[in-house]
Image (spheres, helix red, strand yellow):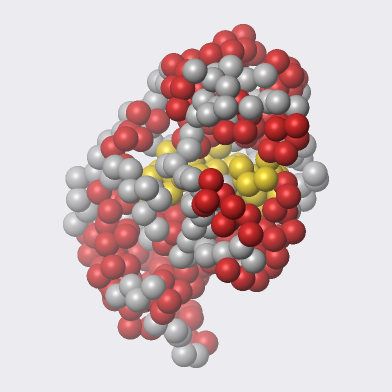
């Protein structure tokens, strides 16, 4: 894996329940998912649009999925159908885990995602490269991503990591991989945002303990708003994504604006997008007809109103996480149905 030296951002993306509407709660669901043709797989609305805009911005896109490696060809074809560019696609070696009787590893995300994140971070061209991590509320993404962020930022050392991994009962060779990768990383405050798709409609308050870095979201227009205020996406990119929601998901002005207002009320955006979006829309209108023009004009007007009369935001304190306890909970929740009791 090699990241382009000019990439300012790395976007790491889960697939199941984050990009794809995947069901895997039963054995029947797993079989159905494995047999689906690429054109039958359904994307979460707006996910492809956000990824396309990140690709257009020059971000390095790493898709890190728990889907088995045997699905690579079908998943790559689905991404091509959606016109999504990616730089690295990492899939889980579940067949290898089963053949080696590593049954805990089949469902474990800590022992799979954490070494993949640390090892890929080691290959980036500079410690200053910022990262956006996108996952869902169906697994342990908020926990694993936050742990990775604090390791990359130098807030946790190898001794703490060893204790966390042992609490999570990862396999010894996986622990060794993590410790080696951590020792070879250049520490920096790398992770800018952790975005968690509320696929199961988990209350956002469930994630308050993770601090302001973690942003639970209901739809990908909210992701676009957050990334634009963070300086990752340009205002015109937000307008293109909002236009897609208006045309394909039937979002009217009220629904578009409500997505922003919800983030503002929860303290994840500051009301800073009104003027940049107004200017960007003016530039677009000067070039010719604009799809969903009325809805976009209404959105800009509503955001201007929010900026002048902002709701009292929810102030989230910086998180102090007990990663060993989180690892134990993750282990209990995702224990192997074949071997662990």
Return the x and y of residue 276 as percentages of the image width and height. Answer: 42, 65
| Residue situated in front as seen by the camera: 115 or 313 | 115
Question: Which residue shows up at 41% across the image and 79% down it?
Answer: 247
Left or right: where does residue 76 sit relative to residue 287?
right
Residue lying farthest bottom?
A: 288
Return the x and y of residue 84 as percentages of the image width and height. Answer: 64, 64
Residue 23 higher or lower than 211, as above or below: below
Question: Which residue shows up at 59% across the image and 52% down it?
Answer: 31
Question: Which residue shows up at 47% across the image and 69% down it?
Answer: 241
Q: Is residue 234 visible?
A: no
Residue 250 higher or lower than 216, as above or below: below
| Residue situated in front as seen by the camera: 53 or 216 | 216
Residue 242 higher or lower than 261, as above or below: below
Question: Which residue shows up at 19% across the image and 57% down it?
Answer: 309
Return the x and y of residue 91 as percentages of the image width and height. Answer: 69, 44
Q: Is residue 3 visible?
A: yes
Point out the image quarter for the N terminus.
top right
Left or right: where does residue 250 sit relative to residue 156?
left
Mark count: 0
| Residue situated in front as seen by the camera: 1 or 338 | 338
Q: Quadrant of residue 151?
A: top right
Q: Quadrant of residue 188?
A: top right
Return the x and y of residue 181 as percentages of the image width and height. Answer: 73, 24
């Amino acid at each position: 894996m090699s990241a382009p030296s000019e990439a300012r951002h790395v976007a790491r993306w889960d697939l199941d329940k984050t990009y794809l509407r995947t069901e895997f709660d039963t054995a029947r669901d797993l079989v159905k998912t494995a047999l689906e043709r690429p054109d039958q797989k359904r994307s979460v609305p707006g996910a492809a649009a956000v990824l396309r805009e990140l690709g257009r911005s020059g971000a390095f896109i790493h898709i890190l999925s728990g889907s088995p490696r045997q699905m690579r060809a079908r998943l790559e074809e689905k991404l091509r159908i959606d016109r999504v560019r990616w730089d690295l696609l990492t899939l889980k070696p579940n067949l290898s885990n089963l053949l080696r009787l590593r049954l805990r590893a089949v469902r474990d995300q800590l022992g799979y995602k954490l070494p993949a994140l640390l090892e890929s971070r080691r290959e980036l061209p500079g410690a200053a490269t910022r990262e956006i991590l996108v996952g869902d509320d169906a697994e342990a993404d908020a926990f694993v991503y936050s742990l990775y962020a604090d390791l990359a930022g130098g807030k946790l050392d190898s001794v703490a990591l060893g204790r966390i991994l042992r609490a999570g009962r990862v396999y010894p060779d996986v622990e060794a991989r993590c410790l080696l990768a951590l020792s070879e990383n250049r520490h920096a405050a790398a992770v800018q945002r952790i975005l968690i798709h509320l696929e199961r409609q988990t209350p956002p308050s469930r994630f308050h303990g993770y601090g302001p870095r973690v942003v639970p979201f209901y739809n990908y227009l909210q992701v676009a708003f957050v990334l634009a205020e963070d300086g990752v996406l340009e205002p015109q990119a937000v307008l293109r994504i909002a236009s897609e929601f208006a045309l394909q998901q039937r979002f009217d002005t009220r629904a578009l604006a409500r997505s922003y207002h919800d983030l503002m009320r929860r303290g994840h955006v500051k009301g800073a997008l009104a003027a940049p979006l107004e200017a960007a829309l003016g530039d677009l209108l000067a070039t010719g007809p604009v799809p969903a023009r009325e809805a976009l004009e209404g959105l800009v007007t509503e955001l201007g109103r929010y900026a002048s009369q902002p709701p009292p935001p929810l102030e989230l304190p910086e998180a102090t996480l007990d990663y060993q306890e989180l690892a134990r909970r993750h282990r209990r929740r995702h224990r192997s149905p074949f071997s662990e009791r």
